[in-house]
Image (spheres, rainbow, N blue to C red):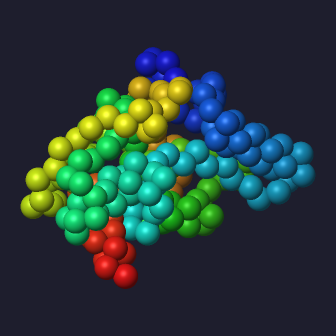
Amino acid sequence: MKESEIPIIEDNAVRPGNLYAVTKVCQNMIGSIYAQAYGMQIMMVRAFNHIGPNQTPQFVVSDFCKQIAEIENGSQEPVVRFGNLGARRDFTDVRDIVRAYVLLIEKGVPGELYNVGSGQAVSIREILDKIIQFSDTPVSVEIDPAKMRPVDVHVIEADITKLKKCTGWFPVIPLETTLEETLDYWRRELLK
């Protein structure tokens, strides 16, 4: 993504940098073709980073929360391992995302693409710092080369103007609430 294209609007040129991103672009292209060619009631969504309790630790927020919970219960040494802390991402609680999807089903225009995100990029470092603040256990942080991505975009941030105009949606769950609830989820999960 070019810096001049941040925040990302629905009409930005797409330049996927990994296979996962390619599948998302293809999915939206197929949906658009079916909506236009066959009049199907399909809307496309460009969903930005979903986060929340019960998310698998392959995602950064859940990974950090799981590591902190493991440190608290003594099953991991007091070191949080991370990849690129400088990247900035648009994180939104999954419950807010689902609310946006429901509103799009009710009010969205078939054939249109909508960005769904918070509209604000936050650094991975800031996310980690906030999660660490929810714990009384002292931790240190360490780069894990295995967690670094071969291709990484510095900033990904949604422009959600179109979604807001169409549905009136905006996120209501504060980032801090989601982070704390995700950490609490992992604390409970590790007791099982």
Q: Is residue 176 above or below residue 158?
A: below
Q: Where does residue 135 sit, x and y in percent of width and height?
A: 15, 60
In this image, 96 relative to 21: left or right? left
Q: Nearer the viewer, residue 161 or 151?
A: 151
Q: Residue at x 53, y 44 (%)?
A: 115
Q: Is residue 93 above or below residue 21?
A: below
The part of the image, by quadrant, that contains residue 83 is top left
Q: Residue at x 49, y 18 (%)?
A: 2
Q: Where does residue 92 sit, x and y in percent of width and height?
A: 40, 53
Numbered marks: total: 0
Extreme-bottom residue of the structure: 192
Q: Nearer the viewer, residue 48 or 188?
A: 188
Q: Where does residue 169 sit, x and y in percent of width and height?
A: 44, 57
Q: Is residue 85 visible?
A: yes
Extreme-right residue of the structure: 38
In this image, 70 relative to 59: left or right? left
In this image, 125 relative to 138: left or right? right
Q: Residue at x 40, y 48 (%)?
A: 60
Q: Nearer the viewer, residue 159 or 15?
A: 15
The part of the image, by quadrant, that contains residue 182 is bottom left
Q: Residue at x 33, y 69 (%)?
A: 186
Q: Quadrant of the C terminus?
A: bottom left
The part of the image, by quadrant, that contains residue 95 is bottom left
Q: Where does residue 113 sit, x and y in percent of width and height?
A: 64, 44
Q: Is residue 168 visible?
A: no
